[in-house]
Every structure is written in structure tokens, then in C-alpha cells.
Image (tube, rainbow, N blue to C red):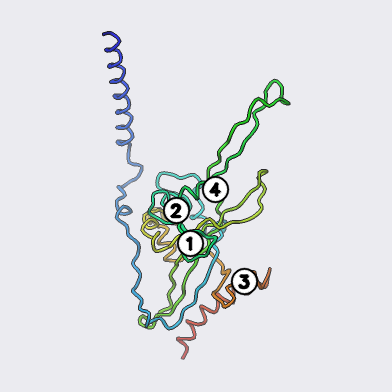
Amino acid sequence: MKTTVSVILFVSLFFGINSTMVAQILDSPRDKVFDQIHLQEKLPIPYSPVREADVVWEKRIWRIMDLRQKINHPFYYPEVPQKEWKNFMTVVMDAIREGTITAYDPSKDDHFLVPLTYQEIEKKYNKTDTVPIYDPENPQHILRYEVVKEDFRSSDVQRIELKEDWFFDKQRSQMDVRILGICPVINLYDDDGNFFGLQEMFWIYFPEARPVLAKSIVFNSKNGAEKRTYDEIFWKRIFGSYVYKEENVYDRKITDYASQMDALLEAERIKNELFEYEHDLWEF
């Protein structure tokens, strides 16, 4: 009887302490001057409707965003997620795990044909290694081997590829651009930690990802009250990038026919063509 009473008291005490801890978490002080309710209701900025008959000119462009560039730092930091801030890759990986964003295999093409599951991505980029455990009294003697698992690190993604369409809409008399796909590019390292290459992880369909990106805050160094989101940054094109491919009959990248300074000049030529086409339309 005493044993039963003791067990009941212990269980009651445990749940009482646990409930108190949960209450403390839920009733924690507001870490802000005001309640943030706007972000929860935020939706992607709607696109203007476009008819096929109104598109009189179109060109497909592929770009690379280097996250080490200062203007792109909001995509790369914070490396460790904070209460309201996550870097771009953390937001995307969380959404793929939850099923709100679909990842597509980049090894086939960039036409969003072959879906990938989160488990497939995790298996590919989570590393497992067997390390020896040495005897502290005899460093030459191995006591056992242990399997060490290293999870995917968002900081290993320092580049993002963009696939976008530029077009002129005669109905609105406006040159416009729509991002179609985003592909993170991960750094590859050998067992000694030496960098040896890059690899495309997966493609995501940007219009599908916009509702998630519209609710993800990006750090704003100019004004903390202006809560920018990843969707708004892409919409306003507040990022740095360079062209690495334009649609062509050979389906080749710039690096396939130019190198070093010639490749840089070719990328600038393609970018200037977009500007000059729109400029020439308004030349009188």
C-alpha cells in the first residue's frame, strides 16, 4: 500500500513539475515591443496575369547567387536558427521535410520532372563515418570503433542557381521577369575537410515555394521594423547574381565556350542585351 501511494505521489509530482515548465514556456515574456501578427497572415505578392498573346518577346536565363557576396548575406545567415530568423536553406529544408515544398532531382534536368523525398536528400547529404577510439593509457591501442553521424549543414551551401524567364508584355507595355526554379549548390569536402567540388542538391519550383518564403523573415540591417521576407527579396530583386547560361540551340553554359575574363564579359553581354532590348522599345 505504501509503495502504491509513493508511486502515485511521484507521478503527480513529475506531471506537476512538467506542467509548470510548459506553463513557463507558454507564458514567457514577449520578446518585442509589440505583438507580431502581420507575418502570420502574410501571403505572396500576386503576379500580374499574363496572356500568351501579349508576350511578344521572351528569353530564359540561368543565374548564380554567391551567398558570400555581402548583398546576399541575409540568405546565408544566421548559421544557427534563431527564434524568428532562419537562413534560406534551413527554411527550404524544413519545408521539404513538412511536405509543403517539393524537391526535384537535378541529375536529370531542371524541368521539375522527378520528385525527391526528404529521406533521399537526407541520406545523400548526411555523412556517416567510423572513427577509432584509442586507449588513453596506450595511444597505440584501439579499444573500439564508433559510428559518427554528421548531419547536413546549411552553411555548406554557398551558391544558389536561379532559372528565370524574361519577357515583354505588350498589354502592360512592361519588361517583366519571373523566377521559375531555385537550385541550392552544396560544397563537397573530402575526409580531411579539403574542398574538392560543387554539386547541385535539388530544384524547387519557385511559385510553389512562395507561400512558405512569404512567411519567413529576413534580417533587415536598415530598419528592424520593416520585416522583409524571402519572397519580397526575390520580388524586389534585392540580391546579387551573375548569368551563367542563356537559352541557346546547343544548350550549353557560358563556361563551355568561354573562360576566365571572356566568360565574365559574355555574362555582361547577355545582361546588357536584356536592358538594351527594353530601352530600344522606347527610343524615338
Give the amino acid at mark 1. Answer: Ile
Indicate the amino acid at tag 2: Val
Determine the secondary structure under disc 1.
strand
Residue underneath mark 2: 92
Q: Nearer the viewer, residue 133 or 245?
A: 133
Question: Which labelled disc corresponds to residue 274?
Answer: none
Q: Residues within 10 Å of mark 2 (few under 14, many from 20)?
A: many
Residue 125 is marked as: 4
Q: CA distance from mark 1 to mark 4?
A: 18 Å
Residue 170 or 233: which is nearer the viewer?
Answer: 170
Image vertical order of residue 94 relative to residue 107, above or below = above
Do the numbered discs 2 and 1 sit on residues whose CB atoms are within 8 Å? yes
- Residue that extends furthest to the bottom in the rendered view of this protein: 284
Q: Earlier in the sequence, mark 2 or mark 1?
A: 2
Residue assigned mark 1: 182
Q: Can you tell which mark lies on residue 254? A: 3
